[in-house]
Image (spheres, helix red, strand yellow):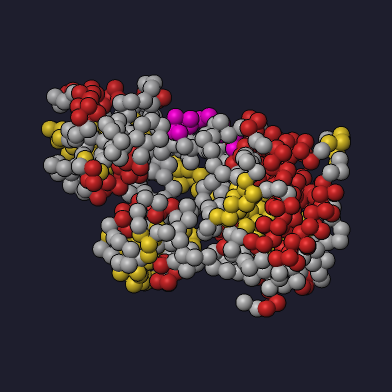
Amino acid sequence: MSSRLFISRRAISATVAIILAALLGLATRPWELAGQETTPADELSSHAKFLASPALEGRGTGSAGIKLARDYIAAEFAKYGLRPGGDNGGYLQRFEVAVGVKVKTPTNLALGEEPPLNLNDSWVPLGMAASGQAEGEVVFAGYGISAKEYGYDDYDGVDVKGKIVVVLRYEPPPKNDRSPFRKSPDYSSHAALRTKANNARDHGAVAMILVDLDGRGDGQSELLSLRSSLWRSGNSLLAGQITRQLAESWFANHGVALKELKARIDRDEQPASRPLAGAKISLQVTLEEERAPADNVVGILPGKAPQEQQEYLVIGAHYDHLGLGHFGARDQSTAGMIHYGADDNASGTAVLLQVARRLSQIEPKPARGIIFVAFSAEELGLHGSRHFVSQWPRLSTIKAMINLDMVGRLRDDRITVFGTRSAPPFEAIVASAARQLELKVNPADGVGPSDHLSFYNKQIPVLHFFTGSHGDYHRPGDTWDKLNIEGMGRIADLVIASAVAIAALPEPPGFTSLPSRPTSADSAERRVGGVYLGVIPEYSRNVDGVLLAGVAPGSPAAAAGLREGDVIVQLAQRKISNIEDLTDALASHKPADQVTITVQRGATNAALPTTLGARR
């Protein structure tokens, strides 16, 4: 470490105290909102209430509501006098993301020799389905689950190679605390459509037909929409859903009582799989990816350094959420309901706006400038922040990043801060400011998941402020009236003090790679147990394999030479078509195992010897 980067804790504490005294005095002044004098608390409440209002419909990417939020933020940046930092001299920085799929012709399903079924009436393709055509004999495969460690396997004793499996939605009800299955609505991963599809494919099935015997409603109301059955991690095989009435009638025509089979499985927690004698299905699915524009909103507060010598600090928050909850909701029964996203992340966006307004008023300006960014499409996979770091000219001028995600429910004066060890001065800066604001900091190990991760992967030090999860996370109950507005104001003070102290450092803060350990962004590895690889999947494009948005610095993946843009297609002897394949492949190994990971890199393949790590 350069000696010039060393600053004593006492000096940092004194600097922060001076900053806070000046800024808190500024914060207590009334300011104008809608022509009336109001307080900073009113300001935060007004921002959050608007962003989480019914009119914005949950701010889903590509929706009319998120455009209202986008324009609101851009107008605020303009009001504060921030310089536009987007495309073509404006505040908006545009990119595209996949938001869904649509059905194209030919798409049809026929039971035996009967005419094709009516699409959207008797059946639908699933949004996670691969496009293609299949025809084959039919096997009832229960819930389509293989939980071999528990002694339950719907595929035990039945041959489904080259055949089409019919599986039940969800999973058996748990019989005891040792069961891997869970009660509604918090089902285990065994109930996920992607898990069922991968399991069917791995047993040799050529297609999967889903039947929901538990859901409410009939006909169209029970059939999953393309949006709610969408799978953003790659597709594995043909898949569709037929109505329960049709399924029961068809099974009865072949001498099988479908409800009785389900009741037997649920009662005994034992498989009841069997071929459906004489039954055949022909299925053809054609799906086309739908893409939509999304916009980051970027405003710049120049520093006092000359333009050619300007360095920057980024302060960001994502303003998108789940919209109507068709993708990403914790409870799929709430699909179609507005997911307001007050804490996630109207709270962070409201604090970002207040911080931008207050910092735009300070004099003198710090040497480093500040770039304020409201990111879009975070919920779909950090798309906005990844676009920003890939497109920003002279990324080397960005010396630090502060992220605000879910800062609306401060409890017991405690704030969790990720990344305090990603730069030498950060821990002392945050601790000093928090102490003077009577806040208690939980310094979190690792980096944590959110838009700051895109910056960290570019070796830019980061701080991520977070007040913790709660029962309303990704549910319709995350409403503005549950926000701790006073707490958000204190967090704004903490962010401002930290930001100004970082911007005023005599030298850039420097980057420290944190210890190799998984973060919750390693979604391919959440259920792997003791094995750690350290990859960050990219969800914006469907590919045959796992496309990497990056790798964790210092991880086994980084040591092996994996990098952003690689597509993992094989691990040891296991073909990798999607994230669940990678999860299963990793789960079959132990820490310190040496495996070869094959990646597509441009037009060629590369075989990379890899030593798997241990989760800490």
Span shown in magenta: 331-341
Residue 204 in the image, given as x and y percentages of width and height: 21, 48
- Name the residue at 29% across, 22% down: 245
Residue 3 in the magenta stretch? The answer is: no
Q: In which quarter of the image is residue 188?
A: top left
- Which of 48 and 549 lies nearest the eye of the viewer? 48
- Which of 56 and 471 lies nearest the eye of the viewer? 471
Residue 236 in the image, given as x and y percentages of width and height: 33, 49
Residue 334 in the image, given as x and y percentages of width and height: 48, 30
Magenta stretch, main secondary structure, is loop
- Which of 563 and 408 lies nearest the eye of the viewer? 408
Q: Judge left or right: residue 539 versus residue 408.
A: left
**518 is higher (above) or lower (below) than 380:** below
Q: Quadrant of residue 122?
A: top left
**6 is higher (above) or lower (below) than 340:** below
Residue 338 in the magenta stretch? The answer is: yes
- Which of 223 and 56 lies nearest the eye of the viewer? 56
Q: In which quarter of the image is residue 425?
A: bottom right
**258 is higher (above) or lower (below) than 377:** above
Quarter placement of the N terminus: bottom right
Q: Given the current orientation, which residue lies at the most extreme front position?
A: 10
Residue 465 in the image, given as x and y percentages of width and height: 62, 51
- Can residue 255 be spotted in the picture? yes
Task: Give the total of numbered labels.
Answer: 0
- Can residue 303 be spotted in the picture? no
Quarter placement of the C terminus: bottom left
- Name the residue at 82% across, 46% down: 27
- Name the residue at 44% across, 48% down: 232
- Name the residue at 77% across, 73% down: 308
